[in-house]
Image: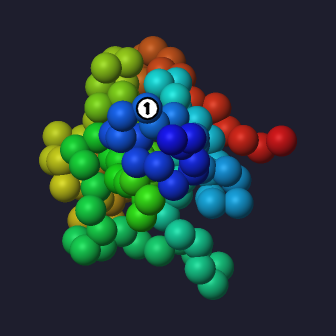
Amino acid sequence: MKPDSNTNIGSPGAVYRPPMMSEGMIGVAVNGVPIIPIPYQKGSYLQPSPSMAFDDCGGRTTQNGKYHYTLPPTCLLKRLGGFVPSDPNWWLADDPSTHWRKAVPASQSPLIGWAIDG
């Protein structure tokens, strides 16, 4: 069987093919996980809602089983020594930005990935 872009990455012999820019990919994390933002509609990004399923690391899968980050990748940030909110449900707050540190840290923020800004 030749895997295609719809093959679930958990299938034996599957080859992971990251989403293309036409599917909304805006970057790639240092661990190889694609970064795809919340859908953009009518001049603004949609606010994440409780009906959206995210794992504890800020990721989710597409309908065809491809894993990607949509929220800040908190597990990756923590592993790299970056700041993460103490509340794992920070993204459900009325103003999610209140859970993120505003002050400039004494050290440089970790590199989490690269933008596809061609």
Q: Nearer the viewer, residue 6 or 48?
A: 6
Q: In terms of depth relative to the viewer, which is nearer, 53 or 92?
A: 53
Residue 66 on image: x %, y %: 45, 49
Q: Residue at x 58, y 72 (%)?
A: 40
Position of residue 101 measured from the top left corner of the image (x, y, whole percent): 34, 40
Q: Is residue 113 above or below residue 51?
A: above
In front of the other: 61 or 45: 61
Q: Report whether 45 appears left or right of 54.
A: right
Q: Residue at x 64, y 32 (%)?
A: 114
Q: Write down the residue under mark 1.
A: 13
Reply above or below: 7 against 109. Answer: below
Task: Tell me which residue sits at (58%, 36%) in the image.
Answer: 28
Within-10-Å neighbours for mark 1: few <14, some 14–19, many 20+: few
Tell me if residue 77 comes above or below residue 55 in the rendering: above
Q: How is the image coloured?
A: rainbow
Q: Which residue shows up at 62% across the image and 59% down it? A: 24
Disc 1 element: loop
Residue at the limit of the structure toward the bottom, as seen here = 42
Residue 105 on image: x %, y %:
42, 24
- The quadrant in which residue 78 appears is top left
Residue 11 visible in the current orientation: yes
Three-letter residue code for mark 1: Gly
- Residue farthest to the left? 87
